Image: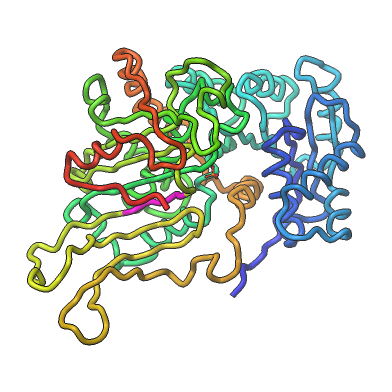
């Protein structure tokens, strides 16, 4: 059965940074797809705001190109022109009062109770002047504000940003995007856990030996060297995406599926993370940096520097100190230029208390529940069964795949932004991070960075298209565990 499309209420979506990369690659194509699926009414407006001196026609031409480069599937001319009719462009230099007045004029062209969204698809240095500009011009009272990482660089800057946002917008109207939360399988993880009784009795330290969360990419830093080298993999991927996945995997069942109930439970997980300070941080983390090889450039030449201590790979071992998880470590790893693009959460179960098949069976794998985010979204259950046929009791590993895997149904999962952009219009904050979550995540990350810095802990060099630095293997093997293969 196909999804039910419910058209949202009319809205004005102001996209600051509308001529930038994120807008062209993700935001505008996402709005286009929701429009052609009938979810966006034709009276909605999408107002591109950027410094470039374009007019609406110029913006429509830019969007046409962006869609032809980034939309999935063929673009029908009639749908395209209907979509382009929603677009308006307003040049905005945040320091120029007359640009702001123009913006106010556009807002005032529609009814006061119309849903108004300001999406800041801009560098973090522009958050402050834009948010202050919105407040100064009275555009902050009923509108919604969307922004995404980097939400601070450490706890102090994240707190400063939160204070700034809260001076102008009520928390209930601030949408902090983590696009991983919009991925189809991440939402499916919540369905799996909280719409079924089957797994809950097993979802704890008594039955789960450890959890692995992997976000492996094949690409390098791809022209984002300036940003990336200041950030490194820990800030770029772990502070947000991987910790969010950890929260959803580890949290208690919320009282209901509403934004604050879910976010309260995620916050408790972040607050239960055992701090990794000083030597503990060094013992439980591995950093790596890719070298050149196989015709691919090294990290250093990608960022155009001779030296850098930043990591393009990080692996961590985290403990969650609460009743459910004490004794079950969570291993997180992410890196660029690895062997394959693979994002998954694996819950690896403990061995059976007594194994009765020793005389016939080759070693078997422990059971695992694998939530695959990419490339083939889906959920697998890995169990042991008897090999069919004669030859005695021979066992092998069998994978039970969920029928829902979107690629199996020939129905590619929609890009996360399609869901998230319209959740803002629907006023649903469930898949967005609350300010206190962001701060709690930084509180856990900051001491790790401090320990690396104080110990002058350099990244270990790894070969491109590999599984990452050898040290990461040691992080697991010292406890008798192995990483799942990156494939
Ligand atoms: C971004 C990071 O948030 O996520 C990038 O800044 C990373 O470095 C990207 O490549 C990965 O996203 P996805 O959706 O391709 O898994």
444 lies left or right of 184 = left
Residue 463 can be seen in this image: yes
**The magenta stretch spans which residues?**
342-346
401 lies left or right of 37 = left
Image quarter where the N terminus lies is bottom right
Q: Main secondary structure of the magenta part?
A: strand
Residue 351 placed where, x, y %?
A: 16, 59
Residue at image coords 26%, 24% = 282
Q: Is residue 192 above or below residue 341?
A: below
What colouring does the structure picture have?
Answer: rainbow
Residue at image coords 66%, 21% = 126
Residue 192 placed where, x, y %?
A: 39, 62
Q: Is residue 360 above or below residue 388?
A: above
209 lies left or right of 435 = left
**Foreground residue among 468 and 143:** 468
Residue 162 can be seen in this image: no
Residue 455 placed where, x, y %?
A: 29, 14
């Amino acid at each position: 059965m196909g999804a039910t499309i419910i058209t949202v209420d009319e809205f004005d979506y102001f996209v600051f940074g509308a001529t930038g990369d994120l807008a062209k690659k993700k935001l505008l194509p996402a709005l286009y797809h929701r429009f052609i699926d009938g979810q966006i009414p034709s009276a909605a407006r999408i107002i591109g705001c950027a410094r470039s001196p374009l007019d609406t026609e110029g913006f429509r031409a830019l969007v046409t190109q962006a869609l032809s480069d980034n939309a999935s599937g063929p673009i029908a001319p009639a749908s395209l022109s209907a979509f382009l009719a929603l677009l308006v462009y307003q040049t905005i230099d945040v320091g120029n009062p007359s640009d702001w007045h123009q913006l106010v004029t556009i807002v005032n062209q529609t009814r006061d109770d119309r849903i108004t969204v300001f999406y800041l698809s801009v560098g973090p240095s522009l958050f402050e002047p834009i948010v202050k500009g919105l407040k100064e011009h009275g555009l902050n009272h009923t509108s919604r504000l969307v922004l995404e990482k980097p939400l601070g660089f450490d706890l102090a800057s994240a707190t400063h940003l939160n204070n700034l946002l809260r001076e102008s917008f009520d928390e209930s109207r601030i949408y902090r995007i983590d696009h991983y939360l919009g991925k189809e399988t991440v939402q499916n993880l919540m369905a799996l856990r909280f719409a079924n009784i089957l797994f809950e009795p097993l979802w704890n330290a008594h039955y789960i030996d450890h959890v692995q969360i992997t976000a492996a990419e094949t690409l390098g830093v791809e022209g984002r060297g300036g940003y990336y080298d200041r950030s490194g993999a820990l800030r770029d991927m772990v502070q947000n995406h991987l910790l969010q996945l950890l929260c959803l995997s580890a949290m208690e069942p919320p009282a209901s599926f509403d934004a604050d109930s879910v976010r309260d439970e995620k916050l408790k997980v972040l607050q239960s993370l055992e701090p990794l300070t000083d030597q503990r941080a060094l013992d439980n983390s591995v950093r790596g940096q890719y070298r050149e090889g196989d015709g691919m450039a090294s990290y250093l030449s990608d960022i155009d520097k001779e030296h850098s201590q930043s990591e393009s790979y990080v692996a961590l071992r985290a403990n969650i100190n609460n009743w459910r998880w004490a004794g079950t470590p969570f291993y997180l790893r992410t890196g660029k230029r690895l062997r394959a693009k693979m994002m998954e959460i694996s819950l690896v179960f403990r061995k059976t208390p007594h194994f009765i098949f020793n005389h016939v069976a080759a070693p078997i794998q422990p059971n695992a529940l694998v939530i695959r985010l990419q490339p083939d979204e889906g959920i697998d259950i890995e169990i042991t069964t008897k090999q069919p046929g004669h030859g005695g009791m021979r066992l092998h590993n069998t994978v039970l795949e969920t029928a829902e895997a979107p690629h199996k149904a020939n129905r590619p999962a929609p890009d996360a932004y399609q869901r998230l952009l319209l959740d803002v219009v629907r006023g649903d904050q469930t898949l967005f991070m609350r300010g206190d979550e962001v701060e709690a995540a930084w509180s856990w990350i900051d001491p790790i960075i401090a320990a690396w810095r104080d110990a002058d802990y350099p990244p270990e060099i790894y070969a491109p298209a590999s599984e990452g630095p050898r040290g990461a293997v040691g992080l697991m093997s010292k406890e008798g565990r192995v990483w799942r293969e990156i494939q």
